[in-house]
Amino acid sequence: SDPIIIVGAGQAGQKAAETLRQKGYEGGLILIGDEPFFPYQRPPLSKAYLKGEMEEERLCLRPPAWFETAAVDFRKGVHVASIDPGPHAVQLEDGERLAYSKLLIATGTRARDLPIEGAHLPGVFTLRTMADVAPIRKALETVEDVAIVGGGYIGMEFAAVAAGFGKTVTVIEACSRILERSVAPEISGYLQELHRAHGVRLQLGTGVARIAGDTAAGGVVLASGETVPAGLVLIAVGAEPVTELVEAAGLKVARGIVVDEACRTSAPDIHAVGDCTVFPSARYGRMIRLESVQNACDQAKAAAAAMLGEDVCYDPVPWFWSDQYDVKLQIVGLSQGYDRTEIEGSPEEGSFALSYFAGDRLLAVDTVNAPRQHMMARKMLAASDSETTPKPARQAVA
Ligand code: FAD
């Protein structure tokens, strides 16, 4: 019969291919990725790899030989141009047409563009792929002033690395604090102080008007009219799901590719996983989209099982991490809708846990340099099955 085809060879696509083989699937398996690399992990791109402390081979999820051993037909640097759900075929950009028995979409996200004047000048970057890193590193060798637009995880990790290189770093954030959408004010405040202590300037509650410069970036002009000088500008204003392929094929998309608890899209024999999907969470009582390694891997495992006919209900306890300087922030659960927090440990000594509650229900726990407490919170949250069975949460980070 026709092979299983996976479109997108990132963290999720690779994990799905591995899981299909682990589960004993012996049919044809084609993994198609449009980047010119073997599947790799992205987190180090704003951490160790950006710093130059990690080799390219270590970024890769599997050595090249793995693909032969596992009989995975990996198509490197090949873009899938369209999907034809009726006849079960995909059209590659190079003209080849491939029939599938089942199709898995794992197209991930792309860095969001900032629609302002100067955003495409040399010296202005986004950070999403391995190919993005080399020109950024080169710029860091010569440039003194660095400006970062967006105080999210990638922006703040980049700020930490640039400050570590001795650059003059300014972060410009439209909200009144960094990481506003994902963590409580206590965590934002802690990290803001950390960055300031490393000399990073934070322009909070500040809009950006344009990037200044004629032939290359010279600075960021703020809404106030003030100019932050910068020879390197990182635009880090979030990511958007890559959905145009499935949208053109008529599949359901709503701020992501809509899938059910078994990772099925609205078309027969097409599943989707990872950053590009929105899926129903009984745990949180809503459709959610996650951008994390946890979700890419766990949802890919679930999809592989579902594609092989297993009964699957994917409803994870999400977790995430971020490294800034020598601080490891770990997050488990989703804190949206919390009405109070409890802190345990000592921010002054640089190790603490912050628990988020809605009434008595523990929603999420953020830990700073407290990996044991993070693991305990993961177990706690996994044990409290759904909204209908809230667990007393006081012992969460005890
Ligand atoms: P991706 O990894 O984006 O892979 C999708 C792939 O599909 C891409 O290679 C894309 O080019 C390809 N593709 C798209 N369309 C087509 C097409 N038509 N044809 C062929 N190929 C196509 N998560 C954490 O949990 N912790 C972290 O600390 C962390 N740090 C991060 C730091 C950075 C700089 C970035 C960018 C991300 C970070 N993440 C982190 C997020 C994490 O990397 C993503 O959630 C994860 O990579 C998602 O995997 P994915 O397979 O869904 O998508």
Image: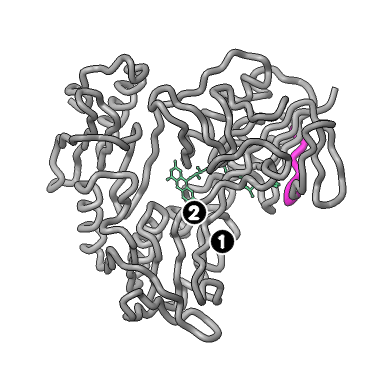
Q: Marks 1 and 2, how far apart in space?
A: 9 Å
Q: Can the viewer see residue 68 in this picture?
A: no
The one nearer the camera, 116 or 162, is 116
Proximity of marks 1 and 2: CB atoms separated by less than 8 Å: yes
Q: Which residue sits at x=60%, y=32%?
A: 15
Q: Position of residue 347 (x, y in %)?
A: 15, 45
Read off the magenta span.
Answer: 72-78
Instruction: State whether residue 219 is above or below residue 351.
Output: below
In percent of width and height, residue 96 lies at 87, 45
Q: Residues within 10 Å of mark 2 (few under 14, many from 20)?
A: many
Q: Is residue 88 visible?
A: yes
Q: Ligand 1 within 8 A of label 2's CB?
A: yes
Q: What residue do we see at 66% from left, 47% from top?
A: 244
Amino acid type, residue under disc 1 in the picture:
Asp
Residue at numbered disc 1: 132
Q: Quadrant of the N terminus?
A: top right
Residue that numbered label 2 is attached to:
45
Q: From the viewer's perspective, is 373 left or right of 116?
A: left
Q: What's the residue at 27%, 69% (across, down)?
A: 201
Query: Going 80% across and 37% down the picture, which residue do you hit?
Result: 84
User: Residue 226 at x, y = what percent?
Assistant: 32, 80
